[in-house]
């Protein structure tokens, strides 16, 4: 290898370290939240982050089965109330397996879009709405029906159309196209 080739190789190696250092520094500046053992980056969209959470495998599979991946990768903004795998496990046996069948896509889509609000609502916004509503706030979902938000102590809760209550276990997981609030129960329209 001649001297010119050696210099070229060294320059390329140096540049690769320089660029990787910038990416790492930028990533380190982001305020991440850990969800399902993975850091959630505010610079990534809802789908890019959700697929890394070990606690949301069922939700990700359901979103794929319903054909909602592209929607949740779009600009939004969206507020997603994201049930964990443990939340889905509370449903009657066979419910999830039945919902992800192609013939049940409409019902699955209805349930999933019931977990999405149009716009970005962080926990502070929701708490303020609950306070303004004297203990509760109704918010319309992308599906079209409303959810009732309420608080108890330091916890934020959501009541669905069937009377089930979900507790927000991790709030304010910021995304490039909205925010995720992790919940412990699947909401039903």
Image (tube, rainbow, N blue to C red):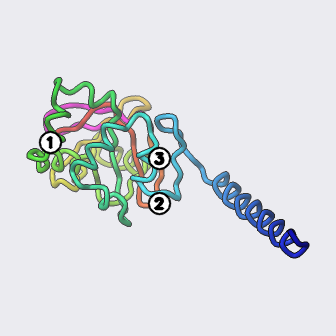
Quote the CA–CA distance across marks 3 and 1.
Answer: 30 Å
- Residue farthest bottom in this picture: 4
Q: Which mark is residue 176?
A: 2
Q: Is residue 7 magenta?
A: no
Q: Which mark is residue 151?
A: none
- Residue farthest right in this picture: 3
Q: Position of residue 189 (x, y in %)?
A: 14, 42
Identify the residue at horizontal 35%, vertical 53% (top origin): 79
Q: Quadrant of residue 153?
A: top left
Q: Are marks 3 and 1 in contact (CB under 8 Å)?
A: no
Q: Position of residue 24 (x, y in %)?
A: 68, 55
Foreground residue among 140 and 133: 140
Secondary structure beneath dot 1 equals loop
Which dot, 3 or 1, sits closer to the camera?
1
Q: Which mark is residue 173?
A: 3
Q: Which residue is mark 1?
A: 101
Residue 53, above or below 48 = above
Residue extent of the magenta highlight: 158-170
Identify the residue at horizontal 19%, vertical 48% (top origin): 146
Quote the CA–CA distance across marks 2 and 1.
Answer: 31 Å
- Residue farthest front in this picture: 1
Quote the CA–CA distance across marks 2 and 3.
Answer: 10 Å
Q: Position of residue 103 (x, y in %)?
A: 8, 46
Q: Position of residue 40 (x, y in %)?
A: 51, 47
Identify the residue at horizontal 16%, vertical 31% (top origin): 95
């Amino acid at each position: 290898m001649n001297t010119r080739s050696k210099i070229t190789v060294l320059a390329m190696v140096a540049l690769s370290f320089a660029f990787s250092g910038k990416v790492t520094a930028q990533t380190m500046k982001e305020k991440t939240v850990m969800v399902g053992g993975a850091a959630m980056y505010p610079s990534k969209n809802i789908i890019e982050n959700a697929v890394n959470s070990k606690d949301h495998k069922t939700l990700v599979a359901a979103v794929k089965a319903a054909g909602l991946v592209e929607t949740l990768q779009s600009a939004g903004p969206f507020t997603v109330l994201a049930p964990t795998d443990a939340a889905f496990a509370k449903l009657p046996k066979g419910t999830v397996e039945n919902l992800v069948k192609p013939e049940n896509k409409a019902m699955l889509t209805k349930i999933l879009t019931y977990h999405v609000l149009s716009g970005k609502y962080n926990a502070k916004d929701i708490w303020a709405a609950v306070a303004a509503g004297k203990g509760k706030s109704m918010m319309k979902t992308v599906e079209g029906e409303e959810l009732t938000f309420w608080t108890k102590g330091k916890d934020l809760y959501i009541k669905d159309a069937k009377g089930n209550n979900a507790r927000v276990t991790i709030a304010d997981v910021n995304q490039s196209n909205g925010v995720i609030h992790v919940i412990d129960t699947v909401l039903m329209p």
